[in-house]
């Protein structure tokens, strides 16, 4: 009689741990620790999740998995205990006032919002971060381990404050392009949605300037390589999930100035404008319009951008 092996579905936490030093026992201990559930790196006062919030989480995870299947990437299993809903004042204080949601070391944080469609929109972005390639570089520090750097999608961030993150704006552009694909997938599964909500779920919600710059870079790289733009886009999307560096490597070899500009582009609109200026992307600059005056009044909070990774 064949003994049936019970199938176990697990959350995806860390894809890879790179050790800088440490003996076998150190490596085994931390591989097991991060191979299981990843603890929250910081505690926040959180609200009990409502049935609606849990249902929306499940709908968005399902939609994300359908997008992953289209991109020939493995599905993820992400239980709703990785979602944390905070009062907006707590979110502002702990995680920042200018972001709508936050992804940190395997956990997703959002504000409590009245409108279910707002939650769908914000969650789709953070869930794409959650599904992205996640690597930790660890070094021994006394009895503990120190996180030297993280890779999240295309973002590489050192844990010291002196080193700026690399590919931050590129990573957010890719995240939001994928998030808009997930939102459209959510939309397909809904019945009786108002036109206003259909339009909202069909749009990108943030990082539009970064998306313009990255799209133009993909087009120009494709022209140099004799490929269709969607083919360079495919390198970019797949590398975001599977850790391949094919896109950045081709960029560095063929368009080194573009590589440097995308490596250094941050997540502010001004950062995208600077990259477009360096690269002479006149059509992008025209679409971006004139730069905001320095003493401009505070921008409207809608739609707020999210905060990317924790460094
Ligand atoms: Zn983000």
Image (cartoon, rainbow, N blue to C red):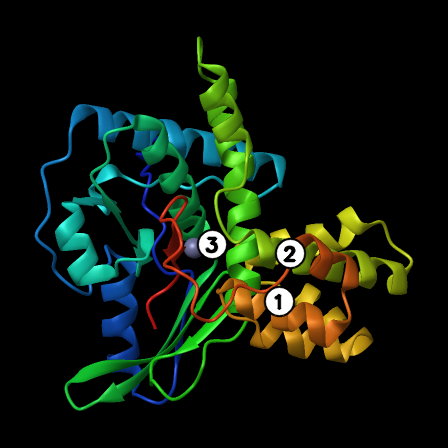
Of residues 143 and 220, the one drawn nearer to the viewer in this rendering: 220
Residue at 32% of width from left, 35% of height from top?
119
Of residues 47 and 68, the one drawn nearer to the viewer in this rendering: 47
Q: Residues within 10 Å of mark 1 (few under 14, many from 20)?
A: many
Side of 147 relative to 259 (left or right): left
**Where does the image place residue 181, in percent across and percent down from the top left?**
56, 36
Of residues 169 and 242, the one drawn nearer to the viewer in this rendering: 169
- How many marks the image carries: the answer is 3
Location of mark 2 (residue): 288
Q: Give me the C-alpha separation between circle 2 and circle 3.
A: 28 Å
Q: Give me the C-alpha separation between circle 2 and circle 1.
A: 8 Å
Of residues 7 and 135, the one drawn nearer to the viewer in this rendering: 135
- Ligand 1 closer than 8 Å to the CB at disc 3? no
Asked if the residue under mark 1 is in contact with the one under mark 2, i.e. CB atoms within 8 Å, the reply is: yes
Location of mark 1 (residue): 273
Location of mark 3 (residue): 132
The N terminus - image quarter:
top left
């Amino acid at each position: 009689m064949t003994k049936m092996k019970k199938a176990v579905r697990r959350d995806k936490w860390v894809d890879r741990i790179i050790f800088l030093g440490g003996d076998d026992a150190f490596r085994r201990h931390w591989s097991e620790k991060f191979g299981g559930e990843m603890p929250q790196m910081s505690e926040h006062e959180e609200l009990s999740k409502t049935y609606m919030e849990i249902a929306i989480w499940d709908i968005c995870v399902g939609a994300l998995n359908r997008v992953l299947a289209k991109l020939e990437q493995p599905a993820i299993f992400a239980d709703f205990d990785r979602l944390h809903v905070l009062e907006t004042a707590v979110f502002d204080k702990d995680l920042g006032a200018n972001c709508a949601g936050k992804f940190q070391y395997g956990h997703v944080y959002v504000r409590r919002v009245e409108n279910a469609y707002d939650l769908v929109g914000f969650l789709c972005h953070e869930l794409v971060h959650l599904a992205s390639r996640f690597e930790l570089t660890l070094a021994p520090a006394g009895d503990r381990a120190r996180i030297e750097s993280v890779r999240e999608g295309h973002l590489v961030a050192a844990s010291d404050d002196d080193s700026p993150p690399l590919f931050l704006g590129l990573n957010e552009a890719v995240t939001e392009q994928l998030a808009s694909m997930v939102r459209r997938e959510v939309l397909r599964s809904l019945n009786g949605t108002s036109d206003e909500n259909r339009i909202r779920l069909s749009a990108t919600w943030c990082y539009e300037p970064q998306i313009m710059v990255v799209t133009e870079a993909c087009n120009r790289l494709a022209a140099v390589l004799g490929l269709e733009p969607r083919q360079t886009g495919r390198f970019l999307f797949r590398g975001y999930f599977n850790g391949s560096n094919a896109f950045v490597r081709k960029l560095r070899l063929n368009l080194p100035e573009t590589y440097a500009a995308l490596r250094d582009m941050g997540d502010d609109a001004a950062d995208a404008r600077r990259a477009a200026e360096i690269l002479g992307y006149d059509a992008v600059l025209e679409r971006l319009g004139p730069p905001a005056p320095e003493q401009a009044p505070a921008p409207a909070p809608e739609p707020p951008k999210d905060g990317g990774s924790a460094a």
